[in-house]
Amino acid sequence: MKRKKVVLGDGDLDIAEFVAVVRDDAEVELSQDYLARVSASRLLVEKFLVESRVVYGVTTGFGENVTKHVSPSDAWKLQQNIVRSHAVSVGEPLEHELVRAIQLMILLSLGRGFSGVRREVLELMAAMLNHRIIPFAPSEGSVGYLSVEAHMALVLMGEGQAWYEGHLLPGADALSAAGLSPLRFECKEGLALLNGTTSITAIALLAAHTALACCNVADVAAAISLQGLRGTVRAFDARYHSVKAHGQQRRTAAVLANLLKNSEIAAHNLDYRLQDAYCLRAVPQVHGACRQAMLDAASSIELEMRSTGDNPIIVPVDGDGIAMSGANFDGTYVGIAADTLCIAMTNLAKISERRTDRMVNPNLSGLPAFLVKAPGLNSGFMIAQYTAAGLVGDMRILSHPSSVDSIPTSGNQEDTICFAYSAAVKAYRASRKLESVLAIELMVGCQALDFLDPAQASPATHAVYELIRRVVSTVDEDRFFYPDIVAITRLIQTGEIAAAVSDVLGESLFSRDGPSPVTYSAPAIHARMNT
């Protein structure tokens, strides 16, 4: 069931709660502990200002301007100026869900009570989330922080632009339409809203969530394809995988064996070949490696979600406090994790595309050319495989790492740059392409089953076949396939593919440990072995 409310401040959020807010519009509520932490931190910042302490970004300029003193009377103007001057990203606006994710991540980071912003600032941002006010934020030009966030912060000031109820409005008008009012930033607030790892963590977190969900779907798609290609399940025997120490390989073999349990097609073809092509028999090794990399990356990103990336941070000390400067805004952890996600997702996509190609190729599949009854007159799924190949090509480009790059900024004050923003955006783009690659394999796999007997497929995969056939009918002659791909992609995104399997085999199938391993009886004589 979808969550209707997520409370911030009573413990750390998990990815599911994060996604509930971002994608399912769960309401955000700030707990009393959250507000108390924020208020206590704010009192310290105001004390520093009254005492004219030297605090980066409060009584000094930013970056190379750190040596420039700012009068306490101009502290508020400094914060307004940083937002306006830093709102310089360009290009197409970020997708709405990415903007919402960044808004939520800002609330999480600043709500830990080390940033010194007023509660009113965070209450307004929470209200914007709850009213679905989506700031206009151009998506290009960030090296890891500052510019995209500045466009979003403009709206809190009543400037910039934002979508409200489908209309792009001036920031002040969008707030007013929702019954909200802009505010003036005071000391430290503009810097805190722009600084840190909020945008990269938010975007990478959504990419990791999608990647792991796709890994489950990839297992399902492979099980359907294996049946359509009359592959053997012996490659998933637990005894074979017991000699490898990789737990996710053994887990994936068990998942595949359970997905194919009670398949009459698989039983009939148990010894059809001595061994299948690589894209079928290597599913545990490839999918398992991809899942392990995704889990490792997601773990690193989740740690960043539970962190404060601001600079400086405000630390209470014996009734007073100090402002400590360093580099907690650095995004190398997230950048490396996001680059890893790209590589893992591309490996998952490339083996999926190979299964798709094998099914549409009559020289390899033993099925009609391009899985259509009258090939020649009809092209069938010929070009659907092109699309999968094109998407995999795109993903290979996206897999070039960003986190190893660096261009100095801010008068060489920031002389090494993480480029984690590029890595996170690449991972998000790759995750969406992976969904389409898998949708194409599922579409083609179901058509392959139509040339055998879908009713003889395993109960779990037959449930998926029936789900897909409710939105995409069997192809008898050429038609416009784009709506079919979109419809199946939507089933992936909503979790309905995984849910259909879980209804048959239980939710434990997709747990981290997976189901119990499976072994098979000794093989029969390979009288029909296809070499």
Image (cartoon, rainbow, N blue to C red):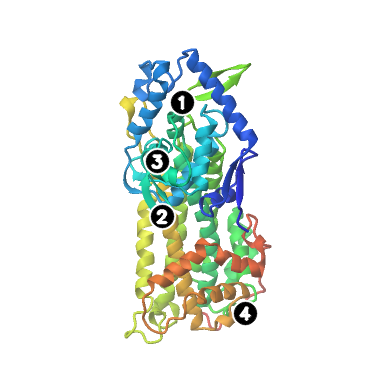
Mark identifier at residue 172? 3
x and y percentages locating residue 491 in the rendered image: 51, 66
The residue to which callout 2 is attached is 166
The residue to which callout 4 is attached is 524
Identify the residue shown where x is 50% and y is 48%: 131
Mark 1, Cα crowd under 10 Å, few <14 / some 14-19 / many 20+, is: many
Q: Tell me the amino acid under the disc marked 2.
A: Gly
For marks 1 and 2 on the same chain, the one whose residue lies earlier in the sequence: 2
Cα separation, mark 4 vs mark 2, equals: 63 Å
x and y percentages locating residue 240 in the rendered image: 61, 63
Mark 3, Cα crowd under 10 Å, few <14 / some 14-19 / many 20+, is: many
Identify the residue shown where x is 41% and y is 83%: 368
For marks 4 and 3 on the same chain, the one whose residue lies earlier in the sequence: 3
Mark 2, Cα crowd under 10 Å, few <14 / some 14-19 / many 20+, is: few
Q: Is residue 271 above or below residue 321?
A: below
Cα separation, mark 1 vs mark 2, equals: 33 Å
| Nearer to me, 509 or 472 | 472
| Nearer to me, 371 or 435 | 435
Q: Is residue 408 left or right of residue 343?
A: left
Mark identifier at residue 226? none
Mark identifier at residue 188? 1
Verify CB contact (< 8 Å) between mark 4 and mark 1.
no
| Farthest residue, direction top | 51
Cα separation, mark 3 vs mark 2, equals: 16 Å
Q: Tell me the amino acid under the disc marked 3.
A: Ala
Residue 7's image quarter?
top right
